[in-house]
Amino acid sequence: MSAAAATSPGPMSARAPLWRRLIGFNLLTGIALGVGGWFLGHWIGSEIHGESLAYFAETAGENDIAIMLGYLLGVIGFLIGLGFAVYPVQRLLGRQPTLAERESHEHGLLRYFSLSTDHKVVAKQYMVGVGFFFFIGGLNAMAIRTELLQPNTHVFGANQYLTLVGMHGSMMMGIFTSGVLGPFANWLVPIMIGSRRMAFPRIESLTFWLLMAAGVVLITTIFFGGFQTGWTGYQPLGDQGTAGYDAYIGFFALVGISMTLLGFNLIVTIVTMRAPGMIWSRLPIFVWSVLATAGLMVLAAPTLIATLLMAAMDRTVQTAFFIPGQGGSPYLFQNLFWVFGHPEVYVLALPGFGIVLELLPVFTRKPLWGYRLAVAGMLGVGILSFFVWQHHLFVSGLNADLRPFFSLSTELISIPTGFIYLCALGTLWRGRIRFTVPMLFCLAWAFNFLWGGVSGIFLSDVPSDVTTHGSFFVMAHFHYTIMGGLIFAFFAAIYYWVPKMYGYKLSERLGKWHFWIMFLAFNSTFAPLFALGFLGMPRRVVTYATNLQGLNDWVSASAYVLGLSLLLFLANAVWSLVFKREPAARNPWQSKSIEWQLPTPVPLHDFEQLPVFDGDPYPYGEERAPLPAVAPAGEGA
Amino acid sequence: MEASAPLDARFQAEPPDWQPHAIRLGGRLLCGSITFFFLAFLFAYFYLLALNTNGHFRIGSTQPPVGLGTPIAGLMLIGAIVYRLAARRPFADVLPAGIVALVCTLAAVALQFYEYTTLSFGAASGGYAAVFFGWTACYAVLALIGAFWIEIQVASLVRWRAGASERRSRREGVPSDDDELLRAGIEASSFYWAYFAAIGAIAFIVLYLV
């Protein structure tokens, strides 16, 4: 495409009337084709299921083949409606289209509702999309705590309760795999390494829309009886479950595909598209954390996809992977799930480490302490995470000879994690700390993650794990790790980078209120769960011993306050970004990172000239340290 | 071509080696992903074999016909070897090799589905049968997806032969790096395909011969 063609308005430009712009490849068309695809798939499935399955369909009132095919064709229709088929068809014909037409023709709000190849647009799509499902997952948590206000069932039945638990866990663990990488890595990585884009921009967009389709598929479980397995989808509950479990399979399979592609795209971008001078030892620590995370995604998520395909085949074509009566084993599912599941934990945690280490030098005005140690820690955590999965199966009848190995490997992983923590503390040591909102969240991360990490060592130890397995102690541990680690870092990133991403300031005062309420309510909610676990309260059981009601009521009340603090954040975001819209300064934190040297908001193509990097990424405290030289692109995003 | 970079003259062009390098690395990463995907089936095979729950790893006669398995694996290997060997030769030599790889793949997939109709056991015939159906069905579907990638190279080569690339670059007034991209696409897809065929060979050994 010529320069003239790239800049001239196309048929779908902003000048066309709204009705014209609504016809074509966009979300509306995607939804229409998605719904149509679902009915088509369901109809085909109803027609083709054989006589051997008729019994199941009639007795259970469901046909898993029809439902699975419905999901499959529904998602394909959705993607076609968004425009994802255009490029493959063109390539199939041997044409080599460019991306310029997509980037140049859509402006304004509509570009957020279709396939976009601008990494900044995709990042904002992720921000809103992930936020929406985080909100739904949070509502589920509130419903869970409401049910646990009394020792006996009083609001939801046992099945509904288990579905709520499963939806909450799946939503948080599934959608939030891209919680940091989606909005922040997509937005920051190309800029931080001096590129204008991701290596495969259409794949970048595809990962987002797959994730949104996954979220919708999960919610549809409520129409099919829900699923009672929790987020881990354990067998034999899965094979025996209602059609709601099909939604679980569809959801996590789509999440797995999205994760694989996102990781793939990030690795390729970081390895191949670094600007001159951006050698490995100058790579920002956040990018290192993204690289380590992406490696886990590319390798671990395919195992999940294969496992879920096995589960789907058990339910549709009557294979027996997980059915012991026919030569299968439910423990096969557990093993395979955790081969994915434990790296998944670090998929969630590593980006949080990266954010904190990226922000600490800015707010302590010191170089990052132990840059290489931190990198080694991240890579070490990533590699070791593939060798610890069986600590989730210590009570499953696992061969006793294997226990010491997995106990040791799990304890070993605390060493590289400790490297990272040490680097955070070393950076804080004697720093000139500024207690801004992002910094407060970073400090809270340090506090919370310590609790999460130390309680994790208890769980790596076999005798201790056998005592607390399946109890609220485990739940407290992973909430401290994931929510205390990732979510607090996520909010640090929001308060730090959103002014640059959106061009408007967030209210500092409301931010501090948000932080303090959230921090106190978080600890008030989850610290008592350690005690509840030791007192014998099991997970995923709707009733509990009456002597535990006092602590449970305290936890529920704290959880409501925690929920309110998140609403306060939402109010801050809406007020600041939609109503008040006070323009953000170019570099309000006096950061020396490259993204802050660009105008606010960042122009469409980021730079006119590719930047040249020639110095330390964290030259804080060095008076004459050079800043990255950038020539920003002229037009606004 | 994934040229997202703006083409306005005031923008410095991206280094021409970025995208070809990205395509080549992408091919290697895909190999890593499918390794872990099929490792799950390999793990399932040995796990269920070791457990042999209720003696039901194999229920009844569950030996698939080697006479069909051999040509399936053989066709995949032949196509991959021919395509890989041609990948570093001039474009004119790659085109027939790509067509051979495509035809071999489609024939292998067709044979695979034919085999399902001739088997003496069903999907419910124990742990082995589950792994057999799961592994081979997934392999066939991924083979079709991979064939799509090879078809793209073949279609691009057909256009290249017709001189479309040269005309296009003249029309758009920008230097063409299409040849380099095409070369990268062929190299990456042939590498991936060779790796994928090797997984097929392992599947053949495990499912038919062990």
Image: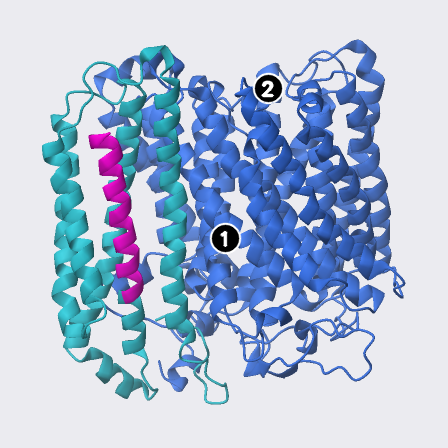
Chain colours: A blue, B cyan
Q: In the rendered image, which residue does mark 1 sit on?
A: A208
The residue sitting at 28% across, 66% down in the picture is B187
Secondary structure predominantly adopted by residues drawn in magenta: helix
- Image quarter where the C terminus of chain B lies is top left
Chain letter, disc 1 residue: A
Where A220 sits versus A212, above or below? above
Q: In this view, does B95 lie to the left or right of A171?
A: left
Q: Give the range drawn in magenta.
A: B187-210
The residue sitting at 68% across, 18% down in the picture is A155
The secondary element bearing badge 2 is classed as: loop
> Viewer-proximal residue, A498 or A263?
A263
Q: In the rendered image, which residue does mark 2 sit on?
A: A395
Where A542 sits versus B183, above or below? above
> Viewer-proximal residue, A243 or A196?
A196
Where B143 sits versus A103, above or below? above
Chain letter, disc 2 residue: A
Residue B110 appears in the picture as rendered:
no
Query: What's under tag 1, amino acid-wise?
Result: Phe
The secondary element bearing badge 1 is classed as: helix
CA neighbours of label 1 inside 10 A, class few (<14), some (14 to 19), many (20+): many
Residue A505 placed where, x, y %?
76, 65
Q: In this view, does A231 lie to the left or right of B165?
A: right
- Image quarter where the N terminus of chain B lies is bottom left
Residue A10 placed where, x, y %?
39, 75
> Viewer-proximal residue, B46 or B141?
B46
Residue A277 placed where, x, y %?
58, 79
